[in-house]
Image (tube, coloured by chain):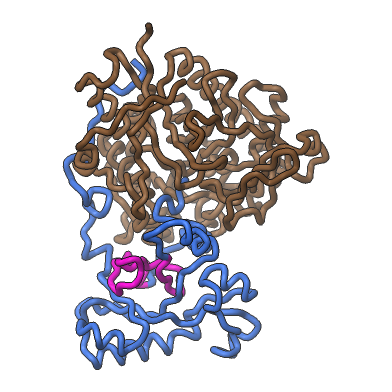
């Protein structure tokens, strides 16, 4: 016989739909329930966080933007990650970014609740050219957003809803994280949610 | 080798759910497709796929042994000099490898041809080892395949056996991009196998890996990791901040750093130079090698680093036949003789993925792409071995 005599699963068997999702980990430790809003009025309209929170968190994210935004040597490189028309000359945002190109701030990501104590961050459109090209051939496509440190945020409802779950470590800027950044700068090629780093 | 309509099991989605296979459909598009299957004879499996796969892997090991002692080879593979110690050290210590997938062009007649070796971060493992196996067992049970049908698929048993051979330390960690279902699924499956082999395991998002002052890699609570499986290619890890911590660390990696030598398209011209005329190899040359002209006007152009078909270009009679866009190619290209994938139904072309577990061939998967280049939109199609007539 050329096949296994038996196949047994411990972690996966009978675990149901969540098995490959998050069955073996504690959600509260690893993921954050977040919202992405374009501006404070979108946040206020959602009636999830208070009006005061919506505004103050936006101000924090807005203040972070000039330093948090990724830098690219050319507008072509920048648009390749963030989409056509989504990049500006660095000097228009910060003197330190003169000569570079940076994405415009697409919105901000905040925790679904105050209790999460999640620092707000600016987010950028994650709309790589290849994916946009693919999008015309497939339905249900969306690129979502990314943070300045490269964490990707896929929101539900093909990207138009504001809700998302994102790995906590990725959002909280853990002092760990020495692996992954090179891959994330390439991950824009991933035209679907299939393999990210595998293949 | 035949493409046989088998019909779907009406409840396969429910079976998939119960067995944790949630990425059978992605972004609304199918990935697992059991409406048909590929049937092989035992001779095709043993003589044309299994034996050549073992031989190809052995050639690769011979090449790796030479490469680690030759800086010109390491440089030709675009492995950064800063990573040479990690690569050489892991080979000289004999760090164990877990698995890899040889991608073969094969149509049931001539010798299978090696297109490339995903020796570092292959996926499609769970669906090969578990879900494809379940499919066979259920179709046999229900009399929907001839009695005595088999499958070339000892993946699951071999993975568990391999984890036993490698041995368990205090902690074996499995790291991947947690938000990507296929990567997460592959890694969770491997974690499952390791657990069954007696390893104490944890899953980590890549961003959660830490490096301690004593040189050990660690989990977020600073628990030291003895063995770290990472579904993250070495060519990127070598550019990351933690790259400098690899060579001197007591933490061992799966795959080990020396796999960077093989999971690299640059291995293809080196293998051809090592074994010119080998029936399972295609002529291949670095693009800047004058001998590349000997391929004529039909060839495949591949970046040294790429995955899921990105940036691959097929040229036939001087015309670009197919081109998959992508972000790769900065490190240069190789050219490989064109071995077009066979077509059994005019629309889709099967690619044979031949698995190596440890150092021995262990099973196969068939992925059907829509075009000449198998990308990440390929369908996974099960296979069986027909009983002897």
Quick check: B370 left or right of B272?
A: left
Work out whether residue B90 can be spotted. yes
State yes or no: residue B322 in magenta: no
Residue B20 against residue A85 in the figure, above or below: above
Quadrant housing the C terminus of chain B: top left
Hue used for the chain lettered A = blue
Residue B72 against residue B141 in the figure, above or below: below
Of the pair B69 and B269, the residue shown nearer to us: B269
Q: On the image, which quarter does residue B378 sit in?
A: top left
Q: Residue at x 67, y 44 (%)?
A: B301
Work out whether residue B159 can be spotted. no
Q: Residue at x 18, y 46 (%)?
A: A16
Q: Which residues are the magenta region? A: A143-172
Quick check: B76 left or right of A169?
A: right
Q: Residue furthest front?
A: B346
Q: Residue at x 43, y 28 (%)?
A: B364
Residue B276 against residue B16 in the figure, above or below: above
| Picture coordinates of residue B233, whole percent (x, y) | 50, 49
Residue B58 against residue A20 in the figure, above or below: above
Q: Residue at x 52, y 78 (%)?
A: A86
Of the pair A146 and A96, the residue shown nearer to us: A146
Quick check: B184 left or right of B99?
A: left
Q: On the image, which quarter does residue A99 sit in?
A: bottom right
| Picture coordinates of residue B17, whole percent (x, y) | 21, 44
Hue used for the chain lettered B = brown
Q: Residue furthest top?
A: B389
């Amino acid at each position: 016989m050329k096949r296994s005599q038996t196949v047994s699963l411990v972690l996966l068997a009978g675990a149901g739909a969540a098995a490959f999702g998050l069955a073996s980990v504690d959600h509260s430790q690893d993921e954050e329930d977040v919202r992405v809003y374009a501006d404070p009025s979108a946040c206020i309209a959602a009636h999830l966080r208070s009006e005061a929170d919506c505004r103050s968190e936006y101000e924090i994210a807005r203040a972070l933007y000039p330093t948090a935004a990724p830098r690219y040597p050319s507008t072509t490189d920048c648009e390749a990650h963030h989409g056509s028309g989504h990049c500006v000359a660095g000097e228009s945002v910060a003197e330190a970014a003169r000569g570079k190109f940076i994405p415009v701030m697409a919105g901000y990501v905040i925790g679904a609740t105050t209790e999460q104590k999640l620092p707000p961050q600016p987010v950028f459109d994650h709309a790589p050219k290849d994916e946009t090209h693919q999008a015309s051939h497939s339905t249900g496509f969306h690129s979502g957003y990314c943070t300045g440190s490269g964490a990707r945020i896929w929101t539900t409802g093909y990207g138009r809803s504001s809700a998302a779950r994102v790995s906590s470590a990725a959002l909280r800027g853990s002092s760990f994280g020495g692996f992954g950044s090179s891959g994330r700068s390439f991950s824009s090629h991933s035209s679907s949610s299939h393999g990210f780093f595998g293949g | 080798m035949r493409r046989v309509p088998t019909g779907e099991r009406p409840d396969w989605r429910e079976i998939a759910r119960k067995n944790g296979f949630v990425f059978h459909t992605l972004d609304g598009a199918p990935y697992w497709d059991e409406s048909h299957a590929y049937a092989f004879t035992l001779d095709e499996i043993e003589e044309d796929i299994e034996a050549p796969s073992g031989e190809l892997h052995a050639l690769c090991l011979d090449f790796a042994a030479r490469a680690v002692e030759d800086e010109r080879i390491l440089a030709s593979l675009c492995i950064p000099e800063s990573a040479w110690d990690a690569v050489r050290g892991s080979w000289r210590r004999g760090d164990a490898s877990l698995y890899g997938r040889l991608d073969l062009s094969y149509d049931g007649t001539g010798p299978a041809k090696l297109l490339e070796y995903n020796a570092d971060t292959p996926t499609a493992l769970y669906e090969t080892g578990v879900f494809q196996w379940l499919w066979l067992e259920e179709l046999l049970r229900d009399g929907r395949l001839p009695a005595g049908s088999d499958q070339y698929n000892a993946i699951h048993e071999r993975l568990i056996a391999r984890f036993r051979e490698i041995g368990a330390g205090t902690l074996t960690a499995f790291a991947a991009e947690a938000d990507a279902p296929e990567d997460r699924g592959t890694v969770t499956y491997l974690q499952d196998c390791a657990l069954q082999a007696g390893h104490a395991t944890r899953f980590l998002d890549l961003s959660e890996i830490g490096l301690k002052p004593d040189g050990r890699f660690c989990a977020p609570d600073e628990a030291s990791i003895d063995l770290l499986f990472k579904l993250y290619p070495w060519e990127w890890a070598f550019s990351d901040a933690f790259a400098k911590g690899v060579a001197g660390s007591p933490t061992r990696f799966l795959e080990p750093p020396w796999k960077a030598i093989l999971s690299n398209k640059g291995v293809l011209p080196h293998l051809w130079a090592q074994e010119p005329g080998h029936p399972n190899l295609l002529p291949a040359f670095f693009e800047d090698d004058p001998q590349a002209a000997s391929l004529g006007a039909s060839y495949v152009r591949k970046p040294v680093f790429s995955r899921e078909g990105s940036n691959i270009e097929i040229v036939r009679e001087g015309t670009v036949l197919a081109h998959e866009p992508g972000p790769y190619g900065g490190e240069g290209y190789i050219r490989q003789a064109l071995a077009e994938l066979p077509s059994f139904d005019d629309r889709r072309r099967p690619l044979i993925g031949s698995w190596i577990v440890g150092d021995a061939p262990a099973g196969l998967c068939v992925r059907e792409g829509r075009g000449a280049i198998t990308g990440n939109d390929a369908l996974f199609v099960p296979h069986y071995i027909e009983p002897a007539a």
